[in-house]
Image: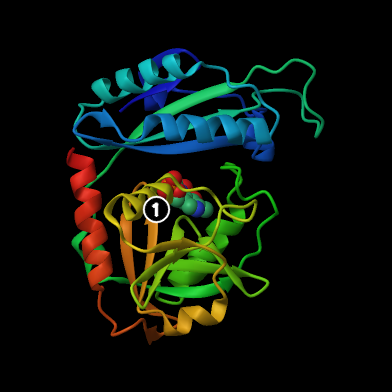
Amino acid sequence: DTVFLNGDFLPADQACISVLDRGFMFGDGVYEVIPVYGGRLFRLEHHLDRLDHSLAGIRLENPLPHSRWQDVLEELIKRNGGGDQSLYLQVTRGPARRDHAFPPVVNPTVFAMSSPLGAPAPELRQGISAVTLEDIRWKLCNIKAIALLPNILLRQQALDQGSAEAIMTRDGEVTEGAAANVFLVRNGTIVTPPKSNLLLPGITRDLVVELCARHGLPCKERPIDEAELLDADELWVTSSTREVVPVTRLDGAPVGNGHPGPVWERMVELYQAYKEA
Ligand code: PDD
């Protein structure tokens, strides 16, 4: 595997950062995950715009202009054999003497790597089970921060209960999954919570909303009461790595009839067609 670190391409096992890196010390950094299909970056500008927002949110300047990011990522794709990949990029506030305050001079650490991206696993198409858990995160969830302890603990709690994903609720409203956004379908209408500081503005989420508008599927961005999960016809989670996944069991009970629904089938068709266009 070839990775990118601070201007160089090198083998993953030779890429080193300081133990004093603020990403390591404090989780002081942000990241992106960008899918690559057939060697092509998917929705790159959306991801780079969100990176800009995340960096602004932690008051760190983007070390690279978008054009340079594009060159770096395209080179990384080539060096990792093209095809389908999942790119991970991370920017931290870099190495500095350990002090909570920002360092007087910042040398950000810029890192990117490629991971394999298989076609969505067939199991995912059968539907996954999820559990609802309280959203224990902070109030700046719109920042794609590398500090993911709450998400990790909630995901593991879900796995320990035999489920694949945690669906989080805060003050009685659905926010998102541990690493995905949430949609429900009720009487043919597709619903997802509006963007706010309480959830990540998912690139996949935005594309689903866009595809609904383009193809005349009724879609509303509005708060979802936790109780609405109980009589949803369909429930989905969306992310760059898993696309649109049906949730067919929630807290041990079937969602709708317990099978992936027709609206999900239609959305997957539209999503595939968009990918291939
Ligand atoms: N996570 N919400 C959270 C908390 C996430 O971590 C993610 C994605 C999403 C979906 O965003 P997008 O559609 O832009 O991938 C929503 C990535 C995939 C990860 O951490 O690996």
Closer-to-camera residue (16/84) = 84
Residue at 42% over, 29% down: 45
Residue at 64% over, 28% down: 21
Count of number-bearing discs: 1
| Residue 85 in picture, x, y percent from top left | 27, 36
Vertical relation: 151 (above or below) 21: below
Q: Quadrant of the image for the N terminus?
A: top left
Vertical relation: 65 (above or below) 171: above
| Residue 78 in picture, x, y percent from top left | 24, 21
- Residue 107 picture quarter: top right
Vertical relation: 227 (above or below) 86: below
- Residue 63 picture quarter: top right
Residue at 46% over, 62% down: 220
Residue named by callout 1: 209
- Residue 26 picture quarter: top right
- Direction from residue 136 to residue 193 in the image, left or right: left
Q: Quadrant of the image for the C terminus?
A: top left
- Helix, strand or loop at disc 1? helix
How many neighbours does mark 1 have within 10 angstroms: few (below 14), some (14-19), or many (20 or more)? Answer: many
Which amino acid, by three-letter code, is at mark 1?
Val
